[in-house]
């Protein structure tokens, strides 16, 4: 989509983590790519020079972008821009996992998110869970859990980043 936008003379806008390898790779398809970590930066960029609002723009998201960040960014583009093409490029499996994590986190006393702390996918799950549960543990393996983590807990929830091996998830579940 970014390469196509470039060929069409459009400016690609990418909503995602600027230093993430996926975002950097996607941006590399056009010398004109502009990356925004979130809607605030996008809106600021559009308002700094009102002429940008009439440019030919193409917007895409990092595949693991938090849904609310993407939706808010889309609304800003729809409200301010006259010639923006918007493509929802968030991975379906990621969206489903984020929605399920939010639902679970809203129903538990402790939410455990297992996965590589450097993974954008795992970090986003932690952020989403923290919006719905006051006690969220971000761990990479079962050895990071302790009984005190669950003091006073009636119900605990578990989710994992997309690339977390099933064996690690099972070990965490067993330890919990």
Image: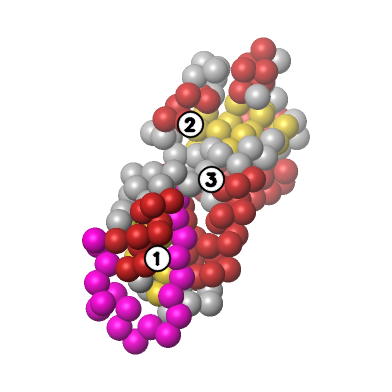
Asked which quadrant contains residue 55, the reply is top right
* 145 vs 6, nearest the viewer: 145
Q: CA distance from mark 3 to mark 2?
A: 10 Å
Reading the image, the residue beneath label 3 is 65
Residue 136, placed above or below residue 154? above
Specify whether 3 is left or right of 141: right
Please tell me how crowded label 3 is: few (under 14), some (14-19), or many (20+) other residues with Cα within 10 Å.
many
Residue 23 image label: 2
The residue depicted at 35 percent of the width and 71 percent of the height is 176
Q: Residue 51: in sight, yes or no?
A: no
Reading the image, the residue beneath label 1 is 173
User: Residue 161 location, x and y as percent?
Assistant: 45, 50
* 14 vs 134, nearest the viewer: 134
* 33 vs 135, nearest the viewer: 135
Magenta range is 143-161
Between disc 3 and disc 1, whose residue precedes?
A: 3
Residue 22, placed above or below residue 94? above
């Amino acid at each position: 989509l970014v390469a196509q936008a470039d060929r069409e003379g459009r400016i690609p806008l990418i909503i995602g983590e600027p230093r993430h390898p996926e975002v950097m790779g996607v941006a590399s398809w056009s010398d004109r790519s502009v990356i925004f970590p979130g809607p605030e930066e996008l809106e600021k960029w559009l308002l700094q020079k009102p002429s940008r609002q009439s440019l030919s723009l193409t917007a895409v998201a990092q595949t693991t972008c938090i849904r609310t960040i993407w939706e808010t960014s889309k609304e800003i583009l729809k409200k301010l821009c006259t010639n923006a093409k918007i493509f929802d490029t968030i991975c379906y499996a990621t969206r489903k996992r984020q929605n399920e994590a939010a639902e679970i986190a809203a129903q538990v006393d402790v939410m455990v998110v297992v996965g590589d702390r450097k993974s954008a996918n795992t970090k986003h799950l932690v952020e989403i869970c923290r919006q719905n549960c006051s006690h969220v543990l971000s761990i990479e393996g079962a050895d990071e859990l302790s009984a005190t983590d669950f003091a006073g807990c009636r119900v605990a929830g578990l989710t994992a980043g997309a690339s977390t091996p099933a064996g690690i998830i099972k070990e965490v579940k067993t330890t919990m």
